């Protein structure tokens, strides 16, 4: 009986001790769990703050690219602050200055190059200047023939004769213009280039006989007043107007192409529509005059005649 009671006592004691140990262990485990929970909440909170500042990308590597790009842009901006002016811009300004000086020289030469013949007509002496102004006021010398006439390699209506010739610089530029037109399927043909003083005299007199002098001088120049004598002019046409010199040429695709593209090769439409009171001649969309690429583009952009261009500068 005593042994049985001791056994029960030890069993109760062991159970109590075990229960107390288990309870203590539970408290420790709970504390550890709580610590882990607190750490986890802190990590989650930090991640949430990070997300607000840097939105995630579907591709993790994209964030690196964005950050690198931002850094490169910042570095580039900082470097740009101290960069000197672009040399190309400086060249452009220098070219513009050279252009202005060149034009001023042309104008000065024109003003200083006038003489008067016994009849009081103004005669230009800067005959080789590509901006030489020849019109009803300013005449070429009757004996002037350009020294560098060549035959441009373009299709012509006439098989031979002086009308196939131009001054060399103008001729080479005309070849480039025709080549570009051909590539763009624009069919144009040369009609009349250089004309001597005597040739122009014969042409003008024929028109006078047919139409009277006043009427003839609206579409034909007196001898000495024709740009064709400079060697810088070329009349062109196309099959769309039966290869004639007609004002309707300006409405054709060939005529429109020339208006838009001729300045890129140094040519202008010398007698534009609406400027008859300035040029003294009717609208001639077929009459190309070489002045050089830079001047041609300026004249075209401004929408002025050669007279106005020289006067404005």
Image (spheres, helix red, strand yellow):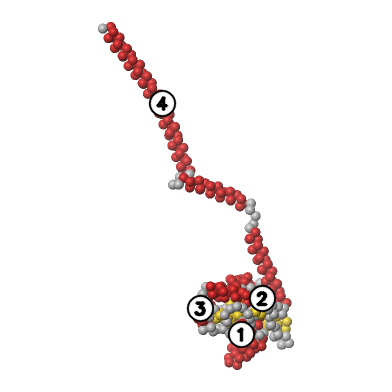
Q: Badge 3, how many Cα within 10 Å: few under 14, some, many 20+?
A: some
Q: Earlier in the sequence, mark 4 or mark 3?
A: 4
The answer to whether residue 279 is visible is no
In the image, residue 1 sits, relative to residue 263, either above or below, namely above
In the image, residue 88 sits, relative to residue 103, either above or below, namely above
* Quarter where residue 169 is shown: bottom right
Residue 104 position, x and y percent, is 69, 71
Query: Residue visible at 68% across and 67% down?
Result: 98
Tell me the residue that label 3 is attached to. 252
Q: Badge 2, how many Cα within 10 Å: few under 14, some, many 20+?
A: some
Q: Earlier in the sequence, mark 3 or mark 2?
A: 2
Q: Tell me how far mark 3 sits from mark 1, CA to CA.
A: 27 Å
In the image, residue 224 sits, relative to residue 4, either above or below, namely below
Tell me the residue that label 2 is attached to. 130
Number of marks in picture: 4
Query: Residue visible at 72% across and 83% down?
Result: 116
Q: Looking at this rendering, what residue extends furthest in the bottom direction?
A: 209
Tell me the residue that label 1 is attached to. 160
Q: Tell me how far mark 4 sits from mark 2, CA to CA.
A: 100 Å
- Secondary structure under badge 2? loop
Q: In which quadrant of the rendered image does the N terminus lie?
A: top left
Q: Looking at this rendering, what residue extends furthest in the top direction?
A: 2
Q: Tell me how far mark 3 sits from mark 2, CA to CA.
A: 29 Å
Tell me the residue that label 4 is attached to. 31
């Amino acid at each position: 009986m005593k042994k049985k009671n001791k056994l029960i006592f030890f069993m109760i004691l062991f159970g109590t001790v075990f229960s107390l140990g288990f309870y203590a262990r539970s408290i420790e485990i709970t504390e550890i769990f709580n610590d882990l929970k607190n750490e986890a909440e802190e990590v989650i909170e930090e991640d949430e703050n990070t997300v607000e500042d840097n939105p995630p990308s579907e591709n993790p590597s994209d964030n690196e690219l964005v950050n690198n790009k931002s850094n490169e842009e910042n570095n580039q901006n900082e470097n740009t602050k101290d960069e000197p002016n672009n040399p190309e811009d400086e060249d452009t300004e220098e070219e513009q200055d050279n252009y202005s000086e060149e034009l001023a020289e042309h104008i000065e030469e024109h003003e200083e190059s006038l003489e008067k013949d016994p009849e009081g007509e103004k005669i230009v002496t800067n005959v080789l200047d590509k901006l030489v102004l020849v019109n009803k006021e300013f005449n070429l010398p009757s004996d002037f023939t350009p020294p560098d006439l060549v035959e441009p390699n373009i299709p012509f209506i006439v098989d031979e004769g002086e009308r196939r010739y131009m001054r060399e610089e103008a001729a080479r530029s005309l070849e480039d213009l025709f080549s570009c037109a051909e590539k763009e399927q624009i069919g144009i043909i040369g009609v009349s280039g250089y004309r001597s003083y005597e040739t122009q005299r014969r042409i003008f007199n024929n028109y006078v006989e047919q139409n009277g002098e006043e009427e003839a001088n609206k579409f034909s120049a007196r001898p000495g007043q024709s740009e064709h004598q400079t060697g810088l002019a070329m009349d062109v046409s196309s099959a769309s107007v039966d290869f004639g010199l007609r004002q309707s040429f300006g409405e054709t695709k060939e005529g429109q192409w020339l208006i838009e593209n001729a300045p890129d090769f140094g040519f202008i439409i010398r007698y534009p529509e609406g400027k008859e009171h300035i040029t003294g001649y009717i609208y001639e969309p077929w009459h190309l005059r070489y002045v050089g690429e830079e001047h041609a583009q300026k004249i075209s952009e401004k929408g002025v005649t050669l007279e106005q261009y020289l006067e404005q500068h």
